[in-house]
Amino acid sequence: MNGVHDIGGTESFGPIVPEPDEPVFHEPWERRAFAVTMAVGANGFWTLPMLRHAIERIPPARYLAASYYEKWLEAAEVMTLRHGLVTRAELDAGAAAGPGPQPFHVLSAPEVGAMFVPTAEAQPAAPAPARFARGDAVRARNLRREGHTRLPRYVRGRLGRVMAVRGVLPLDDATALGRTELQWCYTVAFAGPELWGEGSDPNLTVSIEAWESYLEPA
Amino acid sequence: MAHDHGDGDPPGHSHLSGPAARARALETVLTQKGYIDPAALDALIDTFENRIGPRNGAQVVARAWADPAYRARLLADGTAAIAELGFGGMEGAHLSVVENVPGRHNVVVCTLCSCYPWPLLGLPPNWYKSAAYRGRVVIEPRRVLADFGLHLPESTAIHVWDSTAEQRYLVLPERPAGAEGWSEERLAALVTRDSMIGTGRALDPAAVRP
């Protein structure tokens, strides 16, 4: 989807103003909304790419005006309403009125404790040999995706080079639709002028991660 | 695809309620219906406020500065090398470390959302998630870095890493001169969050109290 979130290359937002000694959360409700969104995500009704897409679909004016956790809160409301975990009447009343669908899982405190313990992830089996190798010239395909995608607009159709073969991962575009599609994922580097044209910074490289279906040989 | 709501107000709220009231309503209803466990919420908040954050990343950088063999392992396989120090897990299971050297500077962004190496840096600051940073850093990184007081000459090559899939990036900043023979603990005090994103440098040892 060509949403407002796909914002790379937009220059008109003015200076960046870092906040000295910024707290992790600015308002008490932000830490609650963050934790609730994380916890309810573990129920198993939706995937992270689905939640991301709910954020992406916040209308542009509000997307740009809302704080980060306002967007999280809105996406959590959208997802819990869509999946019937809550009703609008319950949210308005701030109280449960009846049961909802059975969760597949409820996140526990010990599981949170294990969240940042390093674990060896099993590498999924490759569906096919990797199509590209390090050093290969590739072009980011000019793809039309109505739903969620992780191919940013600013690289579509542009020539790049494979810097690294990262392994086999579920394609987020498919996960956002509730399907699992394993694909090779690559780091692809683009020269600044290839992306931004004449007059742009000649000493710039920008790289992205790209699933195999985002790329074609060049 | 059906729309969830129109372009007006957010869903599931009354017009008089701000985000604090909406967050409370959502938490209350989900708790009452058994979808979320209050103990897990407390653990999440404690973890993200206190257990993870840039001090973890600083420990990794200090080790890399102090131990050339560790630095080599870190650059070759970031995920395995941070696991040696007990770091990994969510948003850190595919980690690459990119090294700043004279003439070549790395900086990290997520233009599409807010991807960030949680185990090493915690949750990102607001500016990292802002439209200004995400929009500008891929096209005019030199001006963006200047907003942070980091002025790089045109002769310095800049590589911007846009985290669009599972790979997360940590910048290994240049070790500043003047900290020869320092312990890892003292070195870690020189390592700022921004130096590990690439929007700053490590602190000057002369400016840090012993």
Image (cartoon, grey):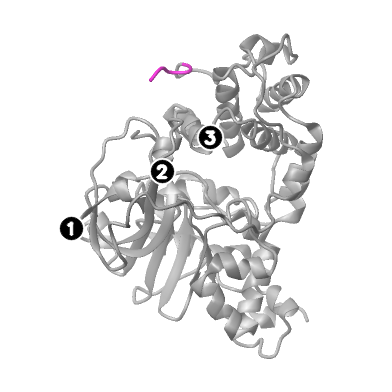
Describe the element under mark 3 as helix, strand or loop: loop
Which disc is residue A96 wearing? Answer: none
Which disc is residue A171 wearing? Answer: 2
Percent coordinates x, y for residue B9 in the rendering: 53, 18
Task: Determine crowd level at label 3: few under 14, some 14-19, many 20+ residues with C-alpha closer than 10 A.
Answer: some
Percent coordinates x, y for residue A89 in the rendering: 65, 9
**Residue located at (56% from left, 24% from top):** A79
Disc nearer the start of the sequence (3/2): 3
Percent coordinates x, y for residue B109 in the rendering: 47, 55
Mark 1 belongs to which amino acid? Answer: Ala
Using the rendered image of the protein, determine whether residue B133 is visible from the camera's viewpoint: yes
Q: Mark 1 sits on what residue?
A: A218
Q: For the residues marked 1 and 2, what is the alpha-carbon distance in whole angstroms?
A: 22 Å
Mark 3 — on which chain does it sit?
A
Question: In the displayed structure, does residue B15 sit left or right of residue A179?
Answer: right
Mark 2 belongs to which amino acid? Answer: Leu
Mark 3 belongs to which amino acid? Answer: Thr
Q: For the residues marked 3 and 2, what is the alpha-carbon distance in whole angstroms?
A: 12 Å
Mark 2 — on which chain does it sit?
A
Q: Which residues are magenta?
A: B1-5
Disc nearer the start of the sequence (1/2): 2
Q: Mark 3 sits on what residue?
A: A47
Q: For this rendering, which residue is in front, B195 or A207?
A: A207
